[in-house]
Image (spheres, rainbow, N blue to C red):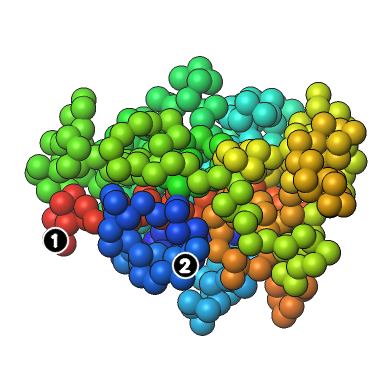
Amino acid sequence: MNVLSLFSGGGGMDIGFEGGFDCLKRSINTDIHPNWIKKDNGKTVCVTDTGFHTVFANDIRPDAKSAWVSFFKSRYEDAVSIYHIGSIVDLVKRAKNGEKVFPDNIDVVIGGFPCQDFSVAGKRRGFNSEKSHTGGKLEVGEPSVESRGKLYMWMRDVITITKPLLFIAENVKGLTNLNNVKEIIEQDFSDAANGGYLVVPARILHVADYGVPQSRERVIFFGFKKNALTGKAAKALASKVIPKEYDPYPPVTHAYNTRGKNLYSPVTCKEAFSDLLEPNEALDPSQQKYSHAKYMGKHCQGQTEVKLDDIGPTIRSEHHGNIEYRRLSEEHGGRYYDEIKAGLKERRLTVRECARIQTFPDDYQFILPARDDLASVSSSDAYKIIGNAVPCVFAYNIAKHLSEKWQLYFREV
């Protein structure tokens, strides 16, 4: 099944949608999903493939492409040509002018459209974003459909052009309590291809309920191509309460917000970091690098110490160097006395530790030199790429759940 990926960044959602990657063993609940492990490596496992594969990816960040290609080149010889740098606005305009931009036979469109204008951490301008589709500042005037806050409309245009059987869009929880933004986006998405899509009511999912060691809530939109659905599926998905058999939202696997039979306890930071050496001892470049931003006091963002016996903090993209601390000094309120007494220095989370919290596999390398026609990736770039991503294990739960229900939803076409 062919996937077209938008706002791809470093490919967290793409990795999850394809499967076949390594993650912590405890992130996969085999009591609920006994057939999701392809190889057991002890502390880690390689999950099974999903049946989805990426044929087109897009983002405006050259460094994100470099990171994406570095990982996916082992899967696709043409990884460089699969990933297209540029604004989605420009791609859609070219397609509407008759240029062949997007591949044929797209089954699924996925994308986490920009969230900064909806996030509680930002100015919350929403549809009235002051930023353009390329990230610059808009000229003063009326809100523009080409603003960063309206880029989901251009994702809708891609859906109209490519006519996938299914699309999945992701954004921050803050979108759901900003006026009636969620309902407007649902309606706009349902208008794709002249009203050809059934959009089920969006829900907020917490990634810690799916084996991700992180405090991160995201709203997920599903849209199904109406004329491709079976009669039973169309009726079920249009129901006020969707029957469990047809529910596209994956069942929770870990007991963070939910209690229930067969649920694993949440995955903790201690588990995620257990085999990582200190930066001065590590051979992995992504474990060697960390932000040296000075401690600014707990009244500022990003000045807290992770709780090793709990899930990690939200890994943000707009961090300005203020990544949370792996360990604070005693002077700054550090609680890991054994580590402090052992002489381990105060430091922020490394690039690899952030990647572990986002469930990226360890064979994904983020610190990269410039090569051929690909940009370099610095540690600062890497933090942003990781923070912008959808956690791989979370995306895998969505993709695997959909792939297992595929024949239930769609008629043979």
SS state under label 1: loop
Q: Earlier in the sequence, mark 1 or mark 2?
A: 2
Distance between mark 1 and mark 2 Cα atoms:
40 Å
Toward the viewer: 26 or 137? 26
Q: Residue at x 86, y 40 (%)?
A: 329
Q: Is residue 235 visible?
A: yes
Which quadrant, please, contains the C terminus?
bottom left
Write down the quadrant of residue 188 in the picture: top left
Toward the viewer: 172 or 228? 172
Q: Amino acid at mark 1?
A: Glu
> Along the horizontal axis of the image, is 102 left or right of 293?
left
Report x, y in % for residue 98.
45, 61
Report the number of numbered marks: 2
Which quadrant, please, contains the N terminus?
bottom left
Label 2 sits on residue = 42
Q: Is residue 325 visible?
A: no
Report x, y in % for residue 11.
54, 59
Write down the quadrant of residue 36 in the picture: bottom left
Report x, y in % for residue 72.
54, 72
> Along the horizontal axis of the image, is 159 left or right of 355?
left
Q: Residue at x 60, y 40 (%)?
A: 309
Q: Residue at x 50, y 58 (%)?
A: 24
Tell me the number on the disc at residue 412.
1
Q: Amino acid at mark 2?
A: Gly
Disc 1 vs disc 2: Cβ atoms closer than 8 Å?
A: no
Q: Residue at x 74, y 49 (%)?
A: 349
> Along the horizontal axis of the image, is 72 left or right of 122?
left
- Residue extending farthest to the left is 231
Report x, y in % for residue 73.
55, 77
Tell me the number on the disc at residue 388.
none
**Circle 1 Cα neighbour tier, 10 Å, few/some/many (<14 / 14–19 / ≥20):** few
Front tag of 1 and 2: 2
